[in-house]
Image (cartoon, helix red, strand yellow):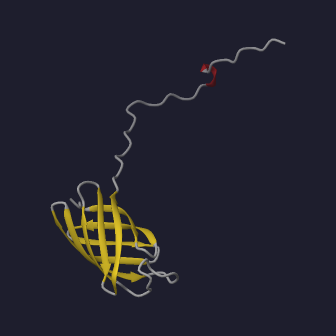
Amino acid sequence: MLKDGTYAAWYRTPLDQGTGIVHVADGQIWGRDSLMTYHGSCSVDGERFTATVSTKRHTDGRSTVFGVEDELTLDIEGRCPGKIASYTATAQQVPGMILHGTLILTEQQPPAREQAEQVPAFNPDKLRKLPKRSR
């Protein structure tokens, strides 16, 4: 099941590949990569999910993984049986090209436990002495 949270994204087409960050919460999906921001809606049905996402360029330069520099509308279908989702997407502006992607749910590390006892002060006199070398 695609859970609400933050995902590391990896995706590729026959032209190129890329990585980004994706957030999912309350039926919305949004994120960014080095060229584009994206926002849309998603629907989850058990392990399967669908989304429609609009992209907008935030950085000039190279082409997108679809080979165009314009804004795109992506139709996404995928499966998420655990913490890793796989999906395919098509761009309405580039018929026939398929993007394959993976989303990996990032997990927050629990905060470090506070030490209940105080750490003793450093005392170099308590260190082991090195043996004396004979000549």
Q: Is residue 44 above or below residue 106?
A: below
Q: State left or right for residue 29 relative to residue 135.
A: left
Q: Nearer the viewer, residue 128 or 55?
A: 55
Identity of the residue furthest to the left in this view: 45
Q: Residue at x 31, y 67 (%)?
A: 23
Q: How many marks?
A: 0
> Whole-percent x and y of residue 6?
32, 62
For residue 76, what is the image quadrant? bottom left
Q: Residue at x 35, y 67 (%)?
A: 101
The residue located at (40%, 30%) in the rendering is 117
What is the x, y in percent for residue 53? Answer: 29, 78
117 or 90, which lies in front?
90
Looking at the picture, tell me which residue is in the foreground, 101 or 35. Answer: 101
Outermost residue on the top side: it is 134
Say left or right for 1 vs 98.
Answer: left
Q: Of all residues shown, which one is farthest toward the right?
A: 135
Q: Closest to the observer: 118 or 5? A: 5
Residue, x 84% and y 13% (percent of image)?
135
Residue 61 sits above or below residue 48 on the image: below
Q: Residue 116 at what x, y percent from top left? A: 37, 32
Q: Quadrant of residue 38?
A: bottom left
